[in-house]
Amino acid sequence: MAEVLVYVDHVDGAVRKPTLELLTLARGIGEPVAVHLGPGAEEAAKVLGEYGATRVLAADAPEFGDYLVVPKVDALQAAYDSVSPAAVLVPSSAEGKEIAARLAVRTGSGIITDAIDLEAGDEGPVATQSVFAAAFTTKSRITRGTPVITVKPNSAAPEAAPAAGAVEQLAVTFGDAATGTKVTSRTARESTGRPELTEAAIVVSGGRGVNGAENFPVIEALADSLGAAVGASRAAVDAGWYPHSHQVGQTGKSVSPQLYIAAGISGAIQHRAGMQTSKTIVAINKDAEAPIFDLVDYGIVGDLFEVVPQLTEEVKTRKG
């Protein structure tokens, strides 16, 4: 069976969930070979092997941390040249999509971004995408070169399938462009204790109906009771009620959780584009004609300031 390269998203060797999803999907189209760049490869290999990586190609160099994405592209290209894979899978983060695009240009290959599923086809892997603001679902395959595909978080449930996960050192030669843009400083993001928005299994979002930054604790309380991430509509973000990093929508972040709760959000197409692939959608809005109700699984017509606190208390009660 042909090998499939899987780019590993990790923090100092701690493998993030989207990578485990990629390994699960990769097993459906070939044998996963993980590419781990930076420190912690030996520890990461234990997890990567548990989820199906037959090999782990590892490289560590200061360039990966000191400069922007080009050194990582150099390394992924080295892995590509070494393996001659049937496909390359990369998480659909902002950095991941840039890495994938640069690799596709270098290898003369087609690229598919933001896939939500993968399956084996007679002429190569077939990717499912949600397109045109989630109004259509398409199936596509690459017709030139090696498929380079980025996959949205929460597109698959990680499934363990123990494999060897043997670590092999990857020789990388950095090009002149690798050191063209240097990272001069980093500021750690303030932790809220909540899951990362794009990776969360549950997201609770507030919109214009929240009516002020001082009222967002109502949304946060429900999110905390569910162990969820907090999102916001563009209207709420533009009004300065919540940070832009939490915006869900076409000009914000795309999410695909198991459960999405929209409180006080009308459901404009811009917002729908960022959350319509959620598995189960619940909307709370006092306007029975709000467009959001056209796509929900469950809708509650009511004042969010009455409904959300009751829902929060009910969740706490059931959790004991």
Image (spheres, grey):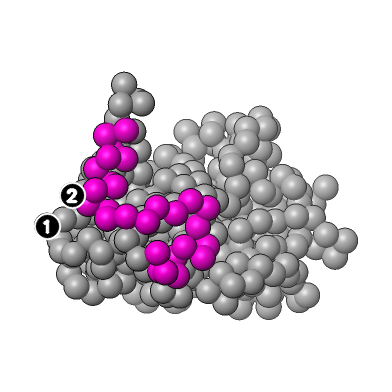
**How many dots with numbers?**
2
Horizontal placement of 196 versus 59: left or right? left
Question: In the image, residue 129 lies at what x, y percent?
Answer: 63, 66
Magenta span includes 313: yes
Tell me if residue 244 comes above or below residue 25 in the rendering: below
Q: Residue 218, percent across and down? A: 21, 49
- Disc 2 designates what residue? 217
Image quadrant holding the C terminus, namely top left
Residue at 15% from the left image edge and 61% from the top image edge: 213
- Report the amino acid beneath label 1: Glu
Q: Is residue 284 above or below residue 177?
A: above
Mark 1 lies on a secondary structure that is helix
Does the magenta-highlighted stretch encompass residue 133?
no
Q: Check if mark 2's residue and mark 1's residue have beta carbons within 8 Å.
A: yes
Q: CA distance from mark 2 to mark 1?
A: 7 Å
Q: Which residue is mark 1?
A: 214
Residue 113 visible within the image: no
Question: In the image, which residues are magenta?
Answer: 288-314
Report the side of 31 relative to 88 (left or right): right
Residue 158 horizontal/vertical position (percent):
58, 40
Residue located 64% across and 71% down the image: 136
